[in-house]
Every structure is written in structure tokens, then in C-alpha cells.
């Protein structure tokens, strides 16, 4: 608060400058504020790993230049509540939990399409067993068997525009149409197992951006991790599919288990799995920013509208219509008045004409 010489509060809006210096001597805050009825109250956050020790606060009122200082001791913290955590089970788009729950409530049977990797077959067998009690019958095909275009009748070819008409063009009867346009020959709901490297249907989804996150074997979902995604009309008109994506057996097992939790309506109590241990290392160095310095100044007739570098000089156009030239060090070279367009001397402000 700002006090007068008798110790009373000066009730008014007084401009203030507040500086906070940390224990390493770095200025962490340099703010300009105004008091409300003589009192300035606000909070400034500090980081959990800020350097411990004596911090200093300097408050200056900018009318008479008086100031006051105070200090406080910031203690070191060794542990804290976790600020981040791992996602529960496989990676997924949040809304896909609801989509997959509905998918299995409305699906009496699905076709499982496995990639060429050996671990996909065992995952398909596990899926068949865990879906049977939910009255979902499973049929298993390899990706090579399913990676065929849908057969179109002549009527369908004449009336359909396809999934990607703009780039593929007119449909033809039979099996000569590309899969991205007509979809796969397998009808009904699908579950895709594998990854873009061993399952061409998953590669098609990734290439056409039907997956919410771009898969990468090293980063997402990563070694030992799974990825669950739901799609609609990615592989056929009106067709829904669920992709269980992984690059190894543990990752695909995680994806299968996560999908089962979705269809059973099981939800974790917290959105993230919190770490069991945490440690804070206080900052020991700081980076002081250099205070900008004034290289040169130049007095101009009005406010600056534009600055342009021309032939080693600076052209300055000011708001009053003056065009001046300066050296690169700010020394004046020339000055002239730019004639305003649609201007007539002594026009008196006639309609459509501005006086010079």
C-alpha cells in the first residue's frame, strides 16, 4: 500500500512498478500496476523447482519515486504431487470409448482381419473367446484375403459416387475399382489387427488420415504399447471398423484388453495413471536477459507510419505526410512533403476532394 507522511493510505490509483528478484539474482518479474484506493494486491506464481533461498521484492510508486523492499525465504521442495502421468492402457481418442461401447452393443457379428505378423493370430483367437459371452460371433480373415475391392453391380456403378470420387473418377461394374473408392469386399463390421507395415487395410486408414494419431513404431504407440481407434465409412459405405494397432505382441495384447474395457463399460477412476515416485531438482543456474540499449534517436515531425530500407538509407513516412531520409545511424539526410492524392489547394473540403 502507498502511505502519506503521516502513515495514512493514499486512497487513489497510483502507478507502481513491482520487481521480484530470485535467489540467484535474476529478475523474475518486472511489472507495472496501479493501486486501487491506495492498495495493490495480486499474486505471482513461482515454479516448484525455483532456486531456494532469499528472494527480494521491490515496490516503487512512480509519482514521487519512493520505494520499499522486502524479502522472503523460498524453501526447497523435494517431492510434489504429480503433474503428469501415463494414459490408462492403450492410446485412444477419448470419444472412441463411447463409439466402441455402442459398436459392440449393436453388432451381432464381426470379421477380424489379421496382419501378417505372427502375434496377430493369437490376438484374434483371444478376441474370439472374450467376445463370445457378449453374443458377438467372430470370423477371422487374413489381410491378404480381405484386401480386395468390393464387387459392384451395374446399377451400383451407375448410381454410386464412391468414397473418393474426386480423385478416382467414374465407377465401373465388377472388381476393377480401387479399394479407396468402393471399399473392401468384406461386408459388415470389422476389427483390424496389426499395424501399417503388416496390414494393408490399416495402412490405408493411416494414409487417408482416418486414425486420430499418426502411428510410429518408436514413438506412438511405441514398444510394448497398443493403440485403439474407431472408424466409420473408412473401408466401405455405412461400414464401421475398430483398429487394434501395435508393433509387437505385448502392445497388441494391451490394445485387446483396452478394447474389452470399452465394450464392458469399465472406466478408470482417474484419467491418468499417476507415477509412484517423483523428485524435484532445484534450479542452480539462471539466464539473465540483457537490457536493451538505445543505439540512436532522431526527431521527426509526426508519428511514424512506415520505415523502409532503400539504397543504404532509411525512408521514413510520418503521419503528416512528410517523407524523410535518414542514415543507418539516424542522421537526417533530406525531408519533403508528399502531395496527398485527390488533393486540391484551397478546395474548402469539397465533396470527394480533400484540401491540401
Image (cartoon, helix red, strand yellow):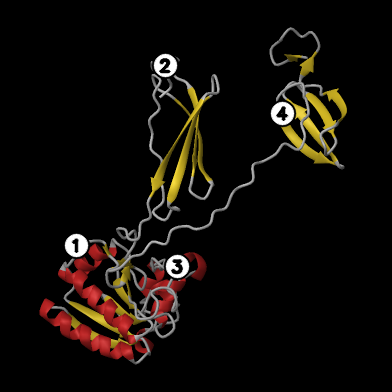
Q: Badge 2, how many Cα within 10 Å: few under 14, some, many 20+?
A: some
Under circle 3, the secondary element is loop
Q: Which residue is mark 1?
A: 269
**Which of the two discs, 3 and 1, labels the residue nearer the N terminus?**
3
Q: State how far apart marks 2 and 4 are (Cα).
A: 39 Å
The residue singled out by tag 4 in the image is 304
Comparing marks 2 and 1, which lies closer to the viewer? 2
Using the numbered discs, state the Cα–Cα distance from disc 3 to disc 1 in whole angstroms: 42 Å
Quadrant containing the C terminus in the rendered view: top right
Give the label on residue 10, or none: 2
Residue 78, position as x, y percentages in the image: 35, 60
CA distance for labels 1 and 4: 60 Å
Residue at 34 percent across and 61 percent down: it is 84
Q: Can residue 8 be seen here?
A: yes
Residue occupied by mark 3: 164
- Few, some or many residues within 10 Å of mark 4 (<14, 14–19, 20+): some
Q: CA distance from mark 2 to mark 1?
A: 53 Å
Amino acid at each position: 500500500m502507498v502511505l502519506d507522511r503521516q502513515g495514512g493510505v493514499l486512497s487513489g490509483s497510483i502507478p507502481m512498478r513491482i520487481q521480484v528478484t530470485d535467489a540467484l539474482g535474476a529478475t523474475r518479474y518486472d511489472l507495472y500496476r496501479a493501486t486501487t484506493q491506495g492498495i495493490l494486491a495480486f499474486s505471482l506464481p513461482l515454479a516448484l523447482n525455483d532456486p531456494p533461498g532469499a528472494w527480494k521484492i521491490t515496490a516503487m510508486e512512480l509519482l514521487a519515486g519512493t520505494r520499499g523492499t522486502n524479502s522472503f525465504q523460498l524453501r526447497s521442495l523435494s517431492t510434489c504431487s504429480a503433474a503428469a502421468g501415463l494414459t490408462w492402457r492403450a492410446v485412444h481418442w477419448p470419444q472412441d470409448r463411447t463409439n466402441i461401447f455402442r459398436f459392440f452393443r449393436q453388432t451381432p457379428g464381426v470379421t477380424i482381419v489379421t496382419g501378417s505378423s505372427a502375434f496377430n493370430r493369437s490376438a484374434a483367437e483371444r478376441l474370439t473367446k472374450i467376445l463370445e459371452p457378449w453374443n458377438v460371433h467372430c470370423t477371422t480373415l487374413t489381410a491378404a484375403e480381405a484386401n480386395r475391392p468390393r464387387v459392384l453391380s451395374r446399377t451400383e456403378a451407375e448410381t454410386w459416387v464412391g468414397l473418393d470420387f474426386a480423385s478416382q473418377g467414374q465407377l465401373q461394374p465388377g472388381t476393377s475399382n480401387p479399394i479407396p473408392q468402393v471399399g473392401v469386399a468384406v461386408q459388415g463390421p470389422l476389427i483390424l489387427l496389426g499395424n501399417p507395415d503388416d496390414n494393408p487395410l490399416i495402412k490405408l486408414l493411416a494414409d487417408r488420415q482416418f486414425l486420430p494419431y499418426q502411428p510410429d513404431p518408436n514413438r506412438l504407440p511405441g514398444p510394448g504399447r497398443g493403440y485403439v481407434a474407431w472408424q466409420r465409412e473408412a473401408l466401405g459405405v455405412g461400414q464401421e471398423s475398430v483398429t487394434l494397432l501395435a508393433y509387437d505382441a505385448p502392445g497388441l495384447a494391451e490394445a485387446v484388453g483396452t478394447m474389452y474395457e470399452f465394450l464392458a463399460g469399465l472406466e478408470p477412476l482417474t484419467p491418468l495413471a499417476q507415477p509412484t515416485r517423483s523428485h524435484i531438482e532445484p534450479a542452480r543456474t539462471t539466464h539473465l536477459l540483457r537490457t536493451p540499449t538505445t543505439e540512436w534517436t532522431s526527431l521527426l515531425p509526426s508519428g511514424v507510419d512506415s520505415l523502409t530500407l532503400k539504397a543504404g538509407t532509411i525512408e521514413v513516412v510520418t503521419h503528416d505526410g512528410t517523407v524523410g531520409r535518414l542514415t543507418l545511424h539516424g542522421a537526417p539526410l533530406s525531408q519533403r512533403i508528399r502531395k496527398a492524392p485527390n488533393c486540391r489547394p484551397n478546395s474548402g473540403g469539397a465533396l470527394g476532394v480533400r484540401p491540401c
